[in-house]
Amino acid sequence: MFEGEKKDWIGAAMTRREDPPLLRGEGRFVADHTPPECLFLEFFRAPQASGRITALELDAARETDGVFAVFAAADLGLSGHSAVNMLIPGARAKSFDVLAGEQVTALGQPVVAVVAQSPAQAMDGAEAVWLDLEAEETLDRSDVPTAQYRTGDAGKALSKSALRCAVRVDHARVAPFALEPRAALAEWDGELLRVHLSTQTPFRAKEDLARILGLEPDQVQVIAPDVGGAFGGKASIYPEEVAVAFAAKVLGRPVKWVASRSEELQAATHGRGAATGAEIGLDGEGQITALRADLDFPLGAWTPYSAYAPARNAARILPGPYRVGSVDIQLTTRFENRAPMGIYRGAGRPEAVMLMERLIDKAARLAGVDPLELRRRNMLNAGDFPYQSPTGELMDLSDLPALLDRLEQESGYVELRQRQQARRAAGEVCGLGLALYLEPCGQGWETARLSLLPDGRFQAETGASAQGQGRETAFAQIVAQELGVTPDQVAVAEGDTARLNNGLGALASRSTAIGGTAMMRASAGLAALARARLASARGVAETEILQVDGGFAWGNRLYTWAEIASEGTLVAEETYTAPQEAWASGAVLAEVTIDRDTGVTRTDRITWVDDAGRVLNPMLLEGQMMGGLAQGMGHAFMERIAYDADDQLLTGSLMDYALPRATDMPGAVHFHSAPTRSGANELGAKGVGEAGCIAVPPALANAVQDALSPFTEDDLDFPLTSEKIWRAMQATEETP
Ligand code: SMO
């Protein structure tokens, strides 16, 4: 019971406490909440991407069976804007219209909101809306926020290099496709607007809703119940959500909207989509002397909160895990008559790592050096960290040589290269692709509250909401570890703005690192309160009271948490701000085989060594890694939002937009955790949520380009579809 017998809950592979209700179908998502008197809202959306509204006829919609109210822009009278994080110097906020008034700027933009007794009746009403548009350019495309990152004279260094290597990587726009689409349910009781929202940032949504609707923040409560994934797509308020809240407030009845898949593909944020190009120079020893890059990030028709995050992340981390003499990175962004661009799992990190890793692989081929060897010559060593990068980033502790050595051994790299020669000689098209990455995470602040309840159990509350990560399981492990109790004694609540004064939410791979540290500190705070109360009640010095498993000890007497609770409850609160970002790192090897006749790529195996810092729960870690890997497979091989020349959407449903399925996953994934404690937060954790999207696609791209190298050295655009690969194999004669 006493010191020395403490069980380690942090690091234990506990199963997710969230799962049993979800598996039994007892999860409660926004769509599952239907209060009495609830009305349903559907949108009439812009059928074209750009034009001036010349006529809007609503009578037929109003007369549709079951329709309760019809709103157009003129009925709203709203003027507030959603907040935008101005992350690059030239950044500019372009706010959305809740409903389009004079003009439309993107296909699928909400124009009319129809509220009815049932969703079907609301849809009938929306279909009865008549809109006349006069085609017209409605976006000022000349407005191009730009930024530049420069150290040294990259141009001069390049011109003096022994070898220069250039790469272009163009990414498709993709959808941060969550299983649960966006959904909102709003209720107004005359004083409080309560909104059930499928969001990853409840507090941000609360602030935005209050500002746009002209309410005080404490008049708005946002509840994120079970959320079925977000991936960056639910981190900023949407016009649809404001319209739902507005309708509920005006009508005095609950109003609910649940997006269809098509609405998601049309009008939810997209990710990636950047056109990127870069050149590196190598000296005679194969050391990188300079890096010059042009990164062009599309923005869409309006800017969600983190519109500039992908562009900024890509630029700031581009040199990655390598020593690069001088850099010159030119960043441009541009508005388009398309769905807004936002963060998507990785948010600029995938684009940066892709570009740098393609460069290294291509340079290795040009130099006749093995790509693993070229990485070894240029990567930062463990002793270089913490490291100040040429773009001004302070990088956390990592041991890249150890990661690469481990990858080489675990994958049997040397033998694989030999076997590749033999397979090629036998007519197979096969490739090996490496990727090495450093990813910033765990930035900012988060809140936590921990209460000792009258029965001796604990209630933990966190501002870091959840959308499937297993947050409640992980945070119960932290509290159990810190207080010497068992996780089943700790209830964990999140996703309700009424519980805490503030919170950041779940994004940018930060919740465990900073939300977890906040919870760890709240646990220490609660223990300090308990010790102080015991000491003062017994008239002894606090130092005489020892914290032990299950409670406290004074001499031979044990005070359990239940006994302490019987003297009154205790509450500890914490807002933790990380002094710097954590940087996760890792290395991946992908093995692919391409079918000569069809161009279909089979991913035979992924070997992956990852440093996610201190691991709270290896099962949750692996779950996050595999989820990110699956989305990375989609990005690399099949996902693409396609527009035609008029910005008409060609991929409006899952008939056209290709999501990866179980059969598209690699034949094998061998994952190895190689943690180095982070020096950036007290818990020692780094991020895990985005690693798969960052690490896996570049390894796949390098493997495909390696497989195709007997045919072509041309850079293929994303996604690497079988058609593109087949065409690449037809275009040129194979060189042995
Ligand atoms: S792309 Mo993430 O949800 O910050």
Image (tube, rainbow, N blue to C red):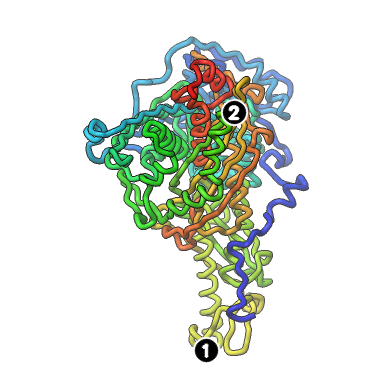
Placement of the N terminus among the 4 image quadrants:
bottom right
Q: Residue at x 50, y 17 (%)?
A: 733
Amino acid found under the numbered disc labelled 1: Gly
Up/down of 181 relative to 61, above or below: below
Q: Nearer the viewer, mark 2 or mark 1?
A: 2
- Decide which of 414, 375 is in the foreground and name it: 414
Up/down of 728 relative to 502, above or below: above
- Decide which of 253, 388 is in the foreground and name it: 388
In-image side of 300 versus 607 (left or right) = left
Amino acid found under the numbered disc labelled 2: Ala
- On the image, the x and y values in percent for residue 459 come to 62, 63
Q: Residue at x 35, y 34 (%)?
A: 91
Q: Residue at x 27, y 40 (%)?
A: 326
Say which residue label 1 marks: 539
Residue 339 in view here:
yes
Task: Report the disc number at residue 661.
Answer: none
- On the image, the x and y values in percent for residue 184 come to 62, 37
- On the image, the x and y values in percent for residue 495 come to 59, 50
Q: Residue at x 61, y 52 (%)?
A: 620
Mark 2 to mark 1: distance in Å?
A: 84 Å
Query: Of label 2 and label 1, which has the lower sequence position?
Result: 2
Dot 2: within a 10 Å radius of its alpha carbon, few (fewer than 14), some, or many (20 or more) residues?
A: few
- On the image, the x and y values in percent for residue 628 come to 57, 42
**Circle 2: element type:** loop
Say which residue label 2 marks: 426
Up/down of 468 relative to 112, above or below: below
Q: Are marks 2 and 1 in contact (CB under 8 Å)?
A: no
Residue 82 in view here:
no
**Circle 1: element type:** loop
